[in-house]
Amino acid sequence: MGITQISDTKTWETDVMNSSLPVFVDFWAEWCGPCRMVSPVVEELAAEYEGKVNFVKVNVDEANELASKYNVFSIPTLAIFSKGQVVSQQVGAASKESYKNMIERALEKA
């Protein structure tokens, strides 16, 4: 399945808010160096958790209303949504292990 790019609120509603699986959301921008560092890690995680967690990327330059709605002031911001609610969030680049821990905790609660 890979990673879905989201740039509008309609797709956000369908793919994140109404998802039956937890959703790992990467708020990023093209010009952001740390975002580019995190991107390959997110792709690896998407492959590892395929069928258990959905992965989406939100370019904050294209979808600034979504970034504003979720108070994303710094990027990268990575969040996990479950049943339409933020259950975990990490601001700034972090290790693959820290993202895996976020995902595992979200899966335990799901």
Image: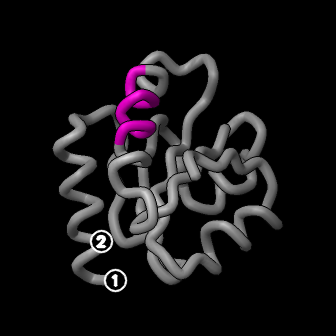
Relative vertical location of residue 18 with respect to residue 54 in this rendering, above or below: below
Residue drawn at (68%, 56%) of the image: 66
Q: Is residue 82 left or right of residue 103?
A: right
Residue drawn at (72%, 72%) of the image: 13
Relative vertical location of residue 38 with respect to residue 85 in this rendering, above or below: above
Please identify the quadrant where the C terminus is shown. Answer: bottom left
Q: Quarter-wise, where is residue 30 in the image?
A: top right
| Residue 64, x across and y down, in percent | 72, 46
Residue drawn at (29%, 61%) of the image: 103
Residue where numbered disc 1 is placed: 110
The answer to whether marks 1 and 2 mark residues whose Cβ atoms lie closer than 8 Å is yes
Q: Quarter-wise, where is residue 57 in the image?
A: top right
Residue drawn at (48%, 21%) of the image: 36
| Residue 28, x across and y down, in percent | 56, 35
| Residue 39, x across and y down, in percent | 46, 30
> How many marks on residues?
2
**Residue nearest the observer in this picture, 22 or 76:** 22
Q: Main secondary structure of the magenta part?
A: helix
Residue numbers of the magenta segment? 37-44
- Residue 43 lies in the magenta-colored region: yes
Q: Of helix, strand and loop, which one carries label 2?
A: helix
Within-10-Å neighbours for mark 1: few <14, some 14–19, many 20+: few
Q: Quarter-wise, where is residue 68 in the image?
A: bottom right
| Residue 87, x across and y down, in percent | 36, 72
Residue type for callout 1: Ala
Q: Is residue 66 left or right of residue 40?
A: right
Q: Of helix, strand and loop, which one carries label 1?
A: loop
Within-10-Å neighbours for mark 2: few <14, some 14–19, many 20+: many
Residue type for callout 2: Ala
**Residue nearest the observer in this picture, 89 or 15:** 15
- Residue 108 lies in the magenta-colored region: no
Residue where numbered disc 2 is placed: 106
